[in-house]
Amino acid sequence: MKGLILLLGALFVGWIQACADSAPEFVASATGGLPVRASVLAGRWYPDEAGALRKEIDGYLAAVPPVASAYPVRALVVPHAGYRWSGPTAAYGYNAVKGKNYKRVVLLGPSHTAGFRGGSIAPVSAYATPLGMVSLDREACDRLLQSDIIHSFAQVHEREHSLEIQLPFLQVVLGDFQLIPVVIGQVIPADVVVLADLLRPLLTPDTLLVLSSDFTHQGPRFDYVPFKENVKQNVQRLDFAAINPILNLDARGFWHLLDQTQATICGRNPIQIGMMALPAQTQVELAHYTTSGEATGDYAETVSYAALVFRQRADYLDRKEQKLLLAAARMTLEQTFAAGKADAYTMPADVISERLKDSKGVFVTLSRNGRLRGCIGQLEHKDPLYQAVPATVLLSAFGDRRFSPLEAEELATTDIEISLMSPMQSVPDWKTIVLGRDGIRLAKQGRSALFLPQVALEQGWSIEETLQNLCLKAGLPIDAWMEGCRFETFTAQVFGETFWALTE
């Protein structure tokens, strides 16, 4: 199968190159250099007059609640439909970077009009919108073009909207910046790794990564009709199932979910590349989600839109530290089965970093074939992480009363996932809770219950459904959350063994 994909990729490249040779010219540059890519969306997807365009974007941004965070934004996922549909959601992403000092934007979007393998950068010096020119960082673009997987196919860019639709928003929120625009075609897992490796050195602190994507396209027009009943709820569950691995930078989980469901997420490849390129010390939050069906009331044809914000966290573990903790958890179980008694793995002193000496709340989740096999933890743990994780994996494997103790023959097919908790914070209003980012503890009348951050999106629940299920877990009436409840939230860095094998 891999050989067939490679052959088809080569044929696509040849076809696109032939098209590019006969493509119409871009608008000539006034300086006589490379041409300028003229707008093909102005007057159709957004206003063609600068004042009206800026006013529309300012209106979308003004409708977004203020964003306060000490952690810098490294990347965004934003939709790319006409502004009537996607503008309100895109504003949630762009509001998080409004007025920030980014000198450069790496912009990845999918190809809607041409088939090819890898990436393509337009042979232009700038993109034009009614708000002015956006110049390319040609030096960086030319370095990327030296690779075997990034090309310059003019035909790919002529009618493509996934990049251009982002530019007016970027011009309004950032002002002047240079652009590295890459349209992404078909990829295999190995291509994702190569493209991420090429882009990673460009993602400096003064560079913003923008990943352009809509989410599920449901309806006959998209040749995708998985749901004929309860479409609104089922589309949301499908979207949330896809968003959940993004929140954990789990590129492999995202890839497998889309393979299983064939969900029509057009920017799946840019998102996968972005997840692989970003540092492990990244917190992701779902800033907004909606559908075109929500606006029209008609779900026979509906497209989903989401804005996700990726923030850098210095207190998060890096990839090496994550792998050390996962290895410690697995070694603990292997030693325990070999010894016939609990035997926590002792990590060598010379690999224990300062962050691994921190004390944090720890949960360890075990799963087999996608099904929960054990999950236990503490919101606060006095021991350092390198000791807390081996102790907690023993509890998950042998102390979760919902399951029989783990058997030795199960270990090889058991996946380990670790969640590291931030301190609890009181929340005065449940409406401020962000699904996917926040773990939630609900308390009322001496009863309480807790969900980890990933639970709501794994189940496809809205915030109301999440609170209803928390009430049931606490033994309270299903509507008890509506009055007299106390809410606390926390965030978690979540990582697991399956995250590290995209190319296997």
Image: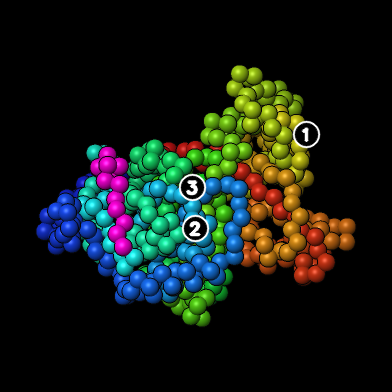
Q: Is residue 142 magenta?
A: yes
User: Are the residues at dot 3 and dot 2 in contact (C-beta closer than 8 Å)?
Assistant: no
Point out the residue furthest to the bottom here: 297
Residue 161 shows up from this direction: no
Q: Is residue 22 left or right of residue 306?
A: left
The one nearer the camera, 466 or 382, is: 382
| Residue at mark 1 to residue at mark 3: CA–CA distance | 32 Å
| Residue at mark 3 to residue at mark 2: CA–CA distance | 13 Å
Question: Which x, y percent locates residue 270?
Answer: 39, 52
User: Magenta residues?
Assistant: 132-143
Q: Secondary structure at mark 3?
A: strand
Q: Which residue is mark 3?
A: 74
Q: Please, is residue 346 above or below residue 153 in the view? A: above
Q: Which mark is residue 279?
A: none
Question: Mark 1 or 3 closer to N-term?
Answer: 3
Q: Which residue is mark 2?
A: 98
Of marks 3 and 2, the one in the foreground:
2
From the image, which quarter does the N terminus lie in? top left
Q: Looking at the picture, which amino acid does disc 2 mark?
A: Lys
The one nearer the camera, 174 or 222, is: 174
- Disc 2 packing (10 Å; few <14; some 14–19; many ≥20): some
- Residue beneath the point at 22% across and 58% down: 36
Question: Mark 3 or 2 closer to N-term?
Answer: 3
Question: Which x, y percent locates residue 458?
Answer: 60, 56
Q: Is residue 389 magenta?
A: no
Q: Which residue is mark 1?
A: 382
Q: Is residue 257 left or right of residue 180?
A: right
Q: Please, is residue 168 above or below residue 138 in the view? A: below
Q: Please, is residue 470 above or below residue 70 in the view? A: below
Question: Which x, y percent locates residue 67?
Answer: 59, 58
- Residue beneath the point at 73% across and 64% down: 429
From the image, which quarter does the C terminus lie in? top left
